[in-house]
Amino acid sequence: MKRLERLAAGLQQKANVREEFTERIEARFAGWNGAFGLDPEACFFEGAETMPAFAGDLTAPTAADAWWLAELCRLVYTPDHRERNQEAYRNLPLREEILAARTPFEEVLSIHKTGNHASIYRLREGGGPTIVCFRGSTRTRQWILNALFRSHPWRRFRLDGDPGSAFVHSGIYVILKRVWPLLAETLERSPRPWFFTGHSLGGALAMLAGALVHPDAVYTFGAPKAASREFFKIRLGGQIRRFVNGSDLVTRLPLSPEGAASPGRELVHGIPAIRLLEGGDFGSFGDPAEENVLPFDLKKLATELEQAPPWLLDHRMGGYCRKLREAGERGILLPE
């Protein structure tokens, strides 16, 4: 009996320690104003009145088009008709109202599967491209706490001619298998050009989905590494644009373990980054290897976390939208 009592006491002590640790972490996150959650309603499509209309031009892609796609990626985090009456979404901006009042788009399909979500948008007046937008993770903290993931063979969707040694992020692969069947039929009935887009996890889904039907363009914002080098030998789409805002941490994840036994399974980006700079300028990483290291010194992490760090704030969709708006207002083209 005493042994059981000691065991129970030990378990309770561990539970208390975990609870205390969780409370401390939550308190720290609570002090990071603006690091998590949706942007205020007024931010959505801010500047649309003076922004060039979405053209979907594949011959000369513009920063303005990238901004429209980025704003749709921000919008897909808002509650749709199915979510708007749920308690967790009750005080959030309503997607239908924002679409109708501030954009030329309408939502023709909205799907949910085991906590994952994607939408298809078209221009209300008809014509033009079809846009598939994948929602990203609503729990940014998970990207920080889970820096390493297993890779999985690209099997289920493999087409004739695809390399047999391609690997993808196992978790994203599972999500794609769940959501794609709900999108495919409507997409096949929709006119081209097809644009796939998404932020964070959604960007990784857009990239992997490109291997299934070869969209005309793929635009990702703040996407993590999703596939091995062999995967990028597959035809993914006509044009691929991968945007990185400043020092966004998520784009550097998952980290590659040192001395990995199977280097062919290492997850990489495979596509050069278009780095968003202040003032609406575009840049790049001088050394692509920079995206393989953390944007902070681990020895100084405690100091970094005293307030919301820039490498976390840079992941917010609002930051991507703001910088692309500045570029779009200048009427510039996207870099090759």
Image (cartoon, rainbow, N blue to C red):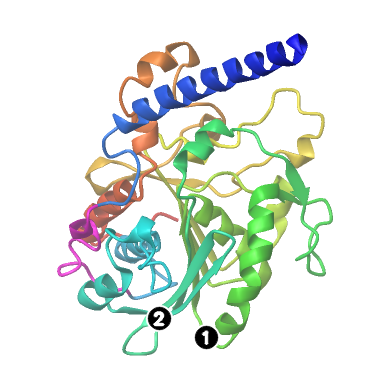
* Residue 267 belongs to magenta span: no
For this view, does 329 lie left or right of residue 28?
Answer: left
**Residue visible at 39% across and 42% down?**
315
Quadrant of the snapshot with the N terminus: top right
- Judging from the image, what secondary structure is the residue with disc 2 in? strand
- Judging from the image, what secondary structure is the residue with disc 1 in? loop
Q: Quadrant of residue 177?
A: bottom right
**Residue 265 in picture, x, y percent from top left:** 76, 41
Which of 301/141 is in front? Answer: 141
Seen from this angle, which residue lies furthest front?
Answer: 1
**Residue visible at 32% across and 32% down?**
30
How crowded pointer 1 is (Cα within 10 Å; few <14, some 14-19, many 20+) is rated as some
Residue 53 showing in the rendered view:
no
**Residue visible at 31% across and 51% down?**
38
- What secondary structure predominates along the stretch shown in magenta? loop
Find disc 2 in the rendering and name its residue: 122
Which of 190/90 is in front? Answer: 90
**Residue 249 in picture, x, y percent from top left:** 46, 35
Find disc 1 in the rendering and name its residue: 190
Residue 304's tag is none
Counting the numbered discs, the total is 2
How crowded pointer 2 is (Cα within 10 Å; few <14, some 14-19, many 20+) is rated as many
Quadrant of the snapshot with the C terminus: bottom left
Mark 1 vs 2: CB contact within 8 A: yes
What's the magenta region? 40-54
